Every structure is written in structure tokens, then in C-alpha cells.
Amino acid sequence: MPVSVRSRGPGSMEDYFSGAFFHLEVGGITVGYFSECSGLRVEYEVMEYQEGGQNGFVHKLRGPAKYSNIILKRGVTSDTALSDWFRAAGRKVERKEGVITLLTPALEPLRRWSFTGAFPVKWEGPGLKASSGEVAVETLELAHEGFEPAD
């Protein structure tokens, strides 16, 4: 069940949701819906510069941005688009643009992130165990050149 906190006015809290899921669109085509998304992370490298004669501190300079791979997980369906895209990338890497959309349980878009230069680097199928009542999950990992909030 989603959890929502609402308060109005400047400097107040906004809505916070849990229990939502994610939609992935790549090259303008829906690739699938996912229950987990991780790796929307960016950090700047820090370069240290020791100034001659300055022993009290080391200068720290911002370097280039580093983006983590995006990892998406979903229950296995009859749709093979994810594994097909992964196999095709093994023959020829085609970098694509895409959008990840966080959806509320009512299927309303809440937030969007667009990424560029993406290609699949890992696909993982489900662990198969007949006696388990767990959902079979597949995982797709994408390398990319960067992302930013969309809209």
C-alpha cells in the first residue's frame, strides 16, 4: 500500500510514495515494467592537489562525474525483449536513449529520469526452484553515459 505524506505551503513536505513501480522506455519503445530500480547514482571524482609550501591542507578539486550502472528487476513474463536486446548487444553495441518513469500504484507518473548512450551489459535470469513460492525474477543492467531528471 502506498504511503503518502502531504503538507502544503513553501518549505513544506511534499508527497512521498512507496510501493510504486517503474516503466522503462528505450529508443521510444516500452521495454517493460519493473519492481526494482537501482543505480540512479552520480558522484564527482575528487582530485587532490598538494600546493608547494602549503602543509596545512590539500586542495580538493571537483573532477568528472561518474554514473553507476542502472539495474532493473522484474518478474519473468513471456516477453523476451530484455534478453533479446542483451543478445543483440553482444553482436553490435547500439547506444540508445531511454526514460525510467516512477509510477504510483494508480499508474500515474510521479518522476522521470532520462538517460543517454545506454546499452545492456548484464542480463540475469531467475533462479529456478520448483518448491519455492517466490516470483521468478529477471535482471537487466545498463551502462550509460549519464542521466538527468526529465520533464
Image (tube, rainbow, N blue to C red):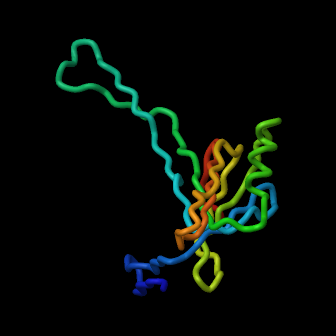
Name the residue at 48% across, 83% down: 2
Q: Where's residue 47, x and y in %?
A: 40, 27
From the top left corner, tell me how far across and down residue 106 is, in percent.
Answer: 62, 86
* Image quadrant assignment for residue 49: top left
Q: How many marks?
A: 0
- Closest to the observer: 130 or 77? 130
Q: Is residue 72 visible?
A: yes
- Give the residue furthest to the top: 52
| Residue 33 falls in image quadrant | bottom right
Residue 105 vs residue 115, the one in the foreground: 105
| Left or right: 146 as drawn, with respect to 25 | left
The picture places residue 70, in percent across and down from the top left corner, at 58, 51
Question: In the figure, 64 relative to 139: above or below?
Answer: above
Picture quarter containing residue 151? bottom right
Q: Considering depth in this image, is 53 or 65 the residue closer to the camera?
A: 65
- Outermost front residue: 131
Q: Is 141 placed above or below 65 here?
A: below
Can you give x and y, in whole percent of width and height, for residue 42 in the image?
50, 47
Residue drawn at point x = 46 percent, y = 80 percent: 15
Up-down relation of residue 114 to residue 120 (above or below): below
Query: Residue 58 or 36: which is nearer the viewer?
Result: 36
Residue at x-position 61% and y-position 65%:
136
- Identity of the residue drawn at 66% across and 57% down: 114
Q: Say if residue 151 shows up in the picture.
A: no
